[in-house]
Image (cartoon, helix red, strand yellow):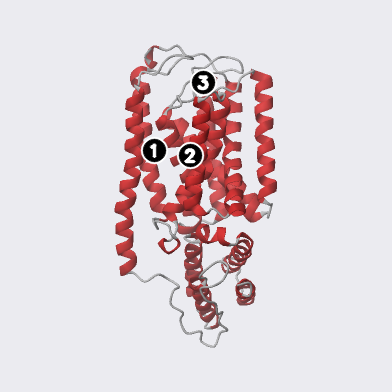
Amino acid sequence: MAASTTALPSVGSTERFLNKVPVVTATFWLIKILSTTIGETFADFLAVQVGLGTAVTDLAMLLVLAVTLIAQLRARQYVPWLYWLTVVEVSIVGTQITDLFTDQLGVSLYLSTAVFAVLLALVFVVWWQQEHTLAITAIDTPKRERFYWAAILVTFALGTAGGDLANEALSLGFRTGSLVFAGLILLVWVLNRFGMNGVTAFWIAYVLTRPLGASLGDLLTQDPSYGGVGLGAGLTSLLFLAVIVVLVAREQVNVNRHGVLAKGEASAVHPRRDYAWAAGGALGVVLASVVLTSFTADSSRATPVPGVVVTSSSGAATIETDATSPLGDLRPFVAIVNDMHAKLKAGDFATVTSRAKDLEVAWDSKEAAIKPASPGDWHDLDGAIDELLTAVRATSPSVAGIDTAITGFRDTVTAIDHKS
């Protein structure tokens, strides 16, 4: 049935829509994983590389999500580009919610994971009581769709918190984490083939794709010296977004050609063709990563990395460390802060500000790699760096305030070194 011949009902609280979500296929899961990775990388790119900061980025993404979600809820049928844009935005905001609780408010990952798990269970309980189904093949009323998006948002927050908790508690790291979470999803698929309830399997896999996507994102963005590919948040986001655009465009063409599926109607796209598109998308990511990695490696050899060389301190007290701390080699960060302190004493505040950006970028490119080594020390150092960046970027920054923040950074590094 073609979309152009479909009579659309008027909007109301009980009227039925055509199904508002895509068929669960191989390309569905690939797009979901890629959008999850964008949730991990794009917000970091805006906050760090672009320089918007966490607060501005969080507010901007929340506003964009509100606009996108309203448009999605007002649509009468499944519109691929709008649906997946909403998923990407929910991915970003869901990640930001967990980061807000963990990094800004200091809430334990154990507590936040438990809270989000309970919240997701409550969404499912109320959804079931109201609609007597949790199946995503029947998202065909406004009420069901609101429940659906509430569950999607909580799954992203839960997946972020649970994935971070697993990585910290088990010290998985992004490489091992990628294998572990991919293995768990494969296990769910096998169990589903042997009789696990399909709805249960879907929602478990949906939660697990969040930490899988985050681990893959860290693998691509983190510095090569820590085992990452070193693409950075910007290139990784653009690469994944390009693949998503191609796959969603193909889905949009199919919808325009064949119409939106009614409940229980078989897809006009052959499963083998869908697998071929999914495999092509995954292969495209791998090949593009190899090419971009080669390019960025050549660029990094030609351009010195900021902060590796310690400049003259001009009488300012310097911080000393080596490569044997519980977090590994902290010397690149220490070198930047030493330089900031020297420029601060010399009255060169413009350089202090630019070096603060260098510190933020350097930390962002390595933090996911070094965090599993000692999560407690990582949180301490992350907090000290945040305080230093806040002092430099204050509305009315003061030499005394920045100097105090540098002292806090020095004390934190010293305390970490003494544990080695």
Q: Quadrant of residue 407?
A: bottom right
User: Counting residues from the N terminus, which is met first, the one under dot 1 or under dot 2?
Assistant: 2
Query: What's the residue type where badge 1 is placed?
Result: Ile
Q: Position of residue 332 (x, y in %)?
A: 48, 72
Indicate the secondary structure of the residue bearing disc 1: helix
Q: Position of residue 21 (x, y in %)?
A: 49, 25
Query: What's the residue type where badge 2 is placed?
Result: Val
Q: Is residue 188 left or right of residue 118?
A: left
The label number, if any, that marks residue 1 in the structure image: none
Disc 2: which residue: 88
Query: What's the residue type where badge 3 is placed?
Result: Thr
Q: Residues within 10 Å of mark 3 (few under 14, many from 20)?
A: some
* Front residue (pair 55, 113): 113
Which residue in the rendered view is the most extreme toward the bottom?
315
Quadrant, the N terminus = top left
Residue at (31, 48) in percent of width and height:
288
Disc 3: which residue: 137
Query: Is the residue under label 3 in contact with that under label 2 (CB below 8 Å)?
Result: no
Q: Is residue 156 visible?
A: yes
Query: Is the residue under label 2 in contact with that under label 1 (CB below 8 Å)?
Result: yes
Q: Position of residue 381 (x, y in %)?
A: 60, 66
Residue at (39, 44) in percent of width and height:
240
